[in-house]
Amino acid sequence: MTTADVVVSQLSLEQLAAMVSGADDWRTVAIPELGLAAAEVSDGPHGLRTETGVDQVWIPSTAFPTASALGATWDRDLIRRVGVALGEESRAMGIQLLLGPGINLKRTPLCGRNFEYFSEDPVLTAELASAYIDGLQSQGIGACLKHFAANNQETERTEISVEADERTLRELYLEAFRRVIATADPWAVMCSYNRIWGTHASQHHWLLTQVLRDEWGYDGLLVSDWDAVHDPVAAVAAGMELEMPGTGGRSAAAIVAAVNEGRLERAVLERAARRVVAFALRALPDGRPAPSPVRDPGIVPGQPLSAEQRAGLGEEAHHQLAREAATAAMTLLRNQNRVLPLAADSTAKLAVIGGYATVPRIQGGGSAGLEPLRVDQPLAAITAIAGDRVSYAPGYPLARTDFYREFEIEGPADADALRAEAVAVAEAVDVVVAFVGLPIAAEVEAADRHSLELPADQVELLKSLVAVGKPLVVVLAAGSAVTMDEWHDGAHAILLSWLGGQGVGTAVAEVLFGRAEPSGRLGESYPMRLADTPGHDTFPGADGVVHYAEGPFIGYRWYDAQHLDVRYPFGHGLSYTDFAYGEAELVAADGDAVEVAVSVTNTGQRRGSEIVQLYLEPPAGGPARPPRELRGFEKLTLEPGQTATARFRLGVRDFAFADTEAQCWRQLPGRYQVVIGSSSRTLHARLDVQRQAASLPFGPSAVS
Ligand code: BGC
């Protein structure tokens, strides 16, 4: 079999230089005579966005819930199955590398791409991303972990320099990557657009070579974000391997000149080219393009796929899985007087209000926006259950947009008239279900939000519906936190449907009527107000620089350290049943690791799932640390009366902070508190654990 070494040994300088940039937007360079085919990549991450050949026209694929929604499932097994399905669709599409998952942390809820990210916590993020990669790569399709690193805002995203201290990077922003690389071995890592300490990530030797390669021992492919390379010679010298998209020979010419003039070592170029070749051989070991039951019969841009093509993508099974995942993500924030679930067999009349009930928010905009194979409509799914008890009013105008073809909004746009009509409909029924959410323009690549409010028309509508005085259920679509001041207390229930992918309509209906449980839990804190949020004073930076002055305190770490009230804490989500927790017990100690167990009983009347969360609280002393940090979680699904035990293993890394002076993870001696909660602020059991002084290198092994 051809090896990368054999191929590279036969390449001329010009061929080596050509190898380290793409052939075009989505493909690597092929050298058929050496058995090297062009590997093809595609966005990503929650479905395939593969070009039809016409600009901005994409081949339809299954739109799974976005990462923000998957992050709320806390369900490794489910996300692994989503990864498998994405792998099957990639294979059917003839794609070898899917550009995802995105694992940047939600530093501020204002980041426009938060919907593409799992959480504000590195452990939750890494665990779920690893499950996704595990599933995807089990199908022989590579994952591309992105965006490395500290890409936490979209404002000035290609130039902004992140000034975060090394400890903050190590404990938060790099940590998610380190954990995933140690456990899931993604085929590729994509660098980010931003600069760190003044240097672009694509040209950052410390980041790409010292940390990723030398410390973590990463052996896969490093890809640039699209057009993130500014100086191809500096990029290769720093450790970058594949510049995307291709530059039509411009970068190759610069690299050849640099080698000839002694500004770049040929050996460094050979190493980069070897990784690209190794990737192409891994992706297409037979040396020819992969057959595709979707593309080979031919694609007509903008036209529906044939039944065979849809079957080739696994449409039916994947739509069911998209529904299942959307259902698992449903997060019940509030449920006064148990207004939910609604009785499916009652005679109560129901008003469904809001345009998002007919055109659901399923995803955000930008490179992650794809053409869904189909979309379940919430109104239709509700009507299928409650029949002619349901009436509908659009309630507020929606911006007409064909941004990645998500909406086709018709009809009148006068907000006052729409609101008056909705109020009249609400007055005539027994229960009101209002669909609201962020517009797609608020959740896109290359722009951040400026406020945490819902659009003013929707807020006015909700206030009017509160005034009607009927039981009010708010179904909220948003990929990141919103504020609720003006309507929260008047809403009896709030169900967060995230950006739940193409099955979200059915998922909402199933949860509303109790056919499924709301098993989602917040992967990010919901603050009271924008001014409370971490980084508020520094976001989005000035003069090309953003200072992460809050240090290793984002999300719940920040709100806890600042003693700030939150609207809903990280990890929060109500169930339709109840759970009781036993004592936390130390069940084993082996070497440096301890094992903690806690039993949980379903004390209610329905089957239900609980996410058991383990947090660690450090002793006083050492550098300022977050009051508590998530170190483990388990999802337990229990029948009424059933008890199960969640088990957690904790090692030195879990107790440690990043000691950047000594360049290691340092566990200070002392008494730590293990805390078991159903959110970061709903705590059920505590346990003291005494630890001795210990340390671990910053390398890959220190996962726990
Ligand atoms: C995005 C990446 C994406 C790439 C290719 C970039 O603008 O930041 O996430 O994978 O484009 O579409």
Image (spheres, rainbow, N blue to C red):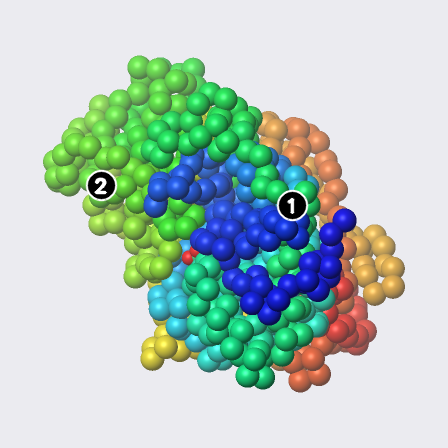
> Residue at the location (39% across, 41% down)?
53
Tell me if the residue at label 1 has its CB under 8 Å from ligand 1: no
Q: Nearer the viewer, residue 589 or 312?
A: 312
The numbered mark, 2 or 1, whose residue comes first in the sequence reads: 1
Q: Is residue 269 visible?
A: yes
Three-letter code for the amino acid on which mark 1 is drawn? Gly
Which dot marks residue 287? 1
451 to the left or right of 34 = left
Q: Residue at x 66, y 68 (%)?
A: 271
Task: Please say whether residue 107 is visible from this viewpoint.
Answer: no
Residue 628 x %, y %: 61, 64
Where ligand 1 lies, by image quadrant?
Answer: bottom left
Note whether 48 is above or below 17 in the view shown: above
Q: Amino acid at mark 2?
A: Arg
Q: Residue at x 17, y 37 (%)?
A: 419
The one of 378 and 51 positioned closer to us in this rendering = 51
Query: Around disc 2, counting alpha carbons within 10 Å, would you say few (fewer than 14), some (14 to 19), or many (20 or more)?
Result: few
Give x and y (percent) for residue 462.
26, 41
Q: Which residue is mark 2?
A: 400
Secondary structure of residue under mark 1: loop
Q: Is ligand 1 closer than 8 angstroms to the Cβ of mark 2? A: no
**Secondary structure found at label 2:** loop
Which label belongs to residue 623?
none
> Residue at the spot x=58%, y=45% of the render?
96
Query: Residue 676 appears at what percent x and percent y?
Result: 66, 53
Q: Is residue 624 above or below residue 595?
A: below
Q: Nearer the viewer, residue 407 or 275?
A: 275
User: Of 432 and 445, which appears nearest the observer?
Assistant: 445
